[in-house]
Amino acid sequence: MNEWIDLSLEIDKDTLPFPGDIPLKLDWEKSFDQDGYNLSILSLTMHLGTHIDYKKHVLNVEDKISHNQFMGKANVIFIEPSNHLIKTNDIIQAYQYIENKEDILIMSINHEKKLNEEAYFKYPKFEKSIFKFLMANHIRLLGADLPSFEYEEGNLLEMHKDLLNHDIYLIENLCHLDVLRSHIEFIALPLPIKTLEASMVRAIAKNL
């Protein structure tokens, strides 16, 4: 029986946040030595570590989040950027060989090797034609081992707006994708906290 594989980035106070964001801060409200038990206070953004971006992150809307949106069978493709660009044609070429096509797509860019380095935030960008590809193949959830999804040209958040405005949610900072096969069972459960613009997740997968 295949075991579940953890695709989530383990984080602590030394984890580098996205440039401009605050790092994780952990304080102890109670301690075992003084109070007989430990109680922690955690402060961080929802974009540190493996997380889902909601529509509210870039659009003036309130999301109606269901855990069912972020679980199901998925496909994994392995893409090698060219001159810091993820070409849509390379995505199409990799995707065409998948037999059982699903509506969740995970891209392994081999970028996770730079995790927790400043170089990690100099990530490859996408051609705008990826939007047409995702729509044509009815993708509802897109994930990758990248800190963000961004077009090679235009506004920093334009790709987020295009995809989220068309019900394509985004999972960023995935890891351990190199052990996955092209067809997997995927689960990334968000925190049940209302009114957030994103949520950290524990993402796991099982090869099928």
Image: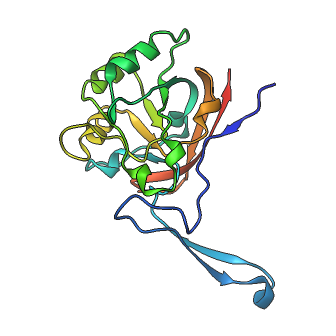
Residue depicted at x 50% and y 9%: 97
Give percent across and percent down for residue 168: 38, 33
**On screen, 66 above or below 138?**
below
Occupied quadrant, residue 6: top right
| Residue lying farthest to the left in this orientation | 154
| Residue lying farthest to the bottom in this orientation | 34
Residue 69 versus residue 47: which sits nearer the camera? 47
Using residue 37 as the reference point, say whether residue 140 is left or right of it: left
Residue depicted at x 36% and y 48%: 122
Occupied quadrant, residue 47: bottom left
Assign the N terminus to one quadrant of the image.
Answer: top right
Instruction: Let me know if residue 117 appears in the view.
Output: yes
Residue depicted at x 33% and y 51%: 57
Assign the C terminus to one quadrant of the image.
Answer: top right
Using residue 69 as the reference point, say whether residue 7 is left or right of it: right
The number of numbered badges drawn on the structure is 0
Using residue 88 as the reference point, say whether residue 199 is left or right of it: right
Residue depicted at x 41% and y 13%: 93
Give percent across and percent down for residue 109: 47, 33
Give percent across and percent down for residue 112: 52, 43
Occupied quadrant, residue 11: bottom right
